[in-house]
Amino acid sequence: MKNTVRLSFLLAALLLTGCNFLFGSRDDETVDDVFRQGAIDPNVSQQVVGYVPVLPIWGGFANPTDVYVGYDELVYVTDASGLHILDLKGTRQTLINIPGAKKVVQDRRLYTYVLGRATREINGENWDLAAVYIVGGAGTGNPVILDTLVHPFNDLTRANTNFRGAADEQVEFTGLTPLIDNSFYLARRGPTNSQISTAAPDNSILVYRPDFSNNGYALGLNANTSSLRSVLDVSGMTGFLAPPQLVFGMSSSRDFIILQERAAAEYKALWIRQQTSEESGTVYLENQNMLNFDTTKASRFLYDSFRFGKPADICTAPDETNYIFIIDSEKDSLYQFTSLGFEGVNPPPNSGLTKQVIASFGGRGSGPFQFNQPQGVAYLRRIVYVADTGNGRIMRYKLSTDLER
C-alpha cells in the first residue's frame, strides 16, 4: 500500500521538480526524505495514482486533535492549547483558550463549534463535563462565545433527571455535523446505556435546532449491540454539507456517517440515513447500498468486517469526487473511499484499469507518508488535511493526478 503511494510520488516529483509551491525547496531535509522514499523503482508506470505531500509541513502543535477548513476559508486546529486559527498558508492568526478542545466544525452562519470540557459546580462539588462551545467571530480576531452546551443539561430527555455524578463525568462529545438549515447532530458516548430508560442512552446522536436547543435524539440506533444501525462508542461523525466547493450548491441531505471505536463493532464506519414520512415520522435507517461488494470495481470496501482499528475522524469531499476519508489512530493510516463504499480513487483516463486504485496509506513513524496516532481529517479543494497528533503537526496531501489543478 505504501509502495504504491511512494511510487506515484516519484512520478510526480520527476514531473514537477521545479514546483517549490508544492514540494518546498529541494534542499529541505523533509523534501529529501520524500525523494528518498519515492526513489524505489525508476521504471514506475505513469498510470500509478496516489496521494503526495504538500509542503511545508505545519508543525509546532501540542498534540493536535482535529483540523477543519471553514466556510471563511480559514483553517481551524484543536490541540492542548485550545483552538488555533490559521490562514490557508499556515500562518497562525488567533488562539482561543478552550479547555479540552477535541473537535471543531463550522456552520453556514460562520458559527464555530468546538467540542471540549467545562467545569460546573453541582451540589457543592466541581465536575468536569462534556461541553460544546459555540463561538461567533472566530476568524475576526474578536471571538465571542455565544453559548455553551454542557452535559447533561443540554439533553431534552434529561431535563427532569437527577445529575448522575461520576457516570455523567465520563460522558464525552465526540462529533458534530451541521446541516443546511444550521440545525446539527451531536455524537455522544458514555457508560449509561439502558434501552428501557426514559432518558436517552449516553451512546446517542442528539438532534439540535438552529437556536441550539435540543430536539431529542436519533431513534432506532442501538447503543449496546453491533449492527448496521449501532452507536458503539462513537469516535467521530460527518454529514454531507461542507464549505462550498461546487458551483451548483450544497447538500441538503440529513444523512450522516459515524465511526465506532468499540472493538466489538463489526462495521466501524456506518452510513445512517434519515427518512421522514407522514406515517412513521422521522426514522434513522441503515444504508443497504454500502453492502454492495462489487469485486469487479473494487478490491476493498468501507463495510468490510472489522476494517479499522480505532477510527478517529471522518470527512466527506463535497465536490464531484464525493470521496470519504477516514483517519485511524491505531493503524496510523489515512483511508479513502468512494461514496459507494469502494476503497480507492478513480483510475486515470485511458489507463485501461477497471477497478478503483488504492490510495490509502500510512504506518507508524514521522516520515511524510507516516503518522503517529492521528486524530483529525479535513478536506478543501482536493487537498486532504490530517491532524498528526503524536508528531505535533498538520499534514496536507493531494492526488498525483490533481497536481496541475
Image (cartoon, rainbow, N blue to C red):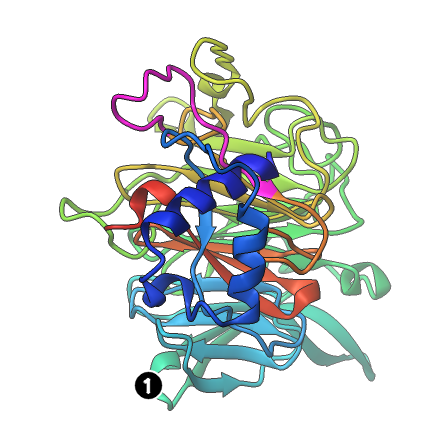
Q: Which residue does the image show at 64% across and 56% down from the upper left?
A: 374
Q: Is residue 60 visible?
A: yes
Q: Which residue is mark 1?
A: 140
Q: Which residue does the image show at 71% across and 80% down from the upper left?
A: 119
Q: Which residue does the image show at 71% across and 27% down from the upper left?
A: 306
Horizontal side, residue 318 vs residue 160: left or right: left
Q: Which residue does the image show at 65% across and 38% down from the upper left?
A: 231
Question: Which of these two is toward me, 192 or 62?
Answer: 62
Magenta region includes residue 3 = no
Where is residue 273 drawn, in percent x and y?
44, 30
Query: Where is residue 226, by image quadrant?
Result: top right
Q: Which residues are magenta?
A: 346-361
Q: Is the N terminus in the top left, top right, bottom left or bottom right quadrant? A: top right
Question: Which of these two is toward me, 304 or 177?
Answer: 304
Question: Which of these two is toward me, 53 or 116?
Answer: 53
Where is residue 305 drawn, in percent x and y?
67, 22
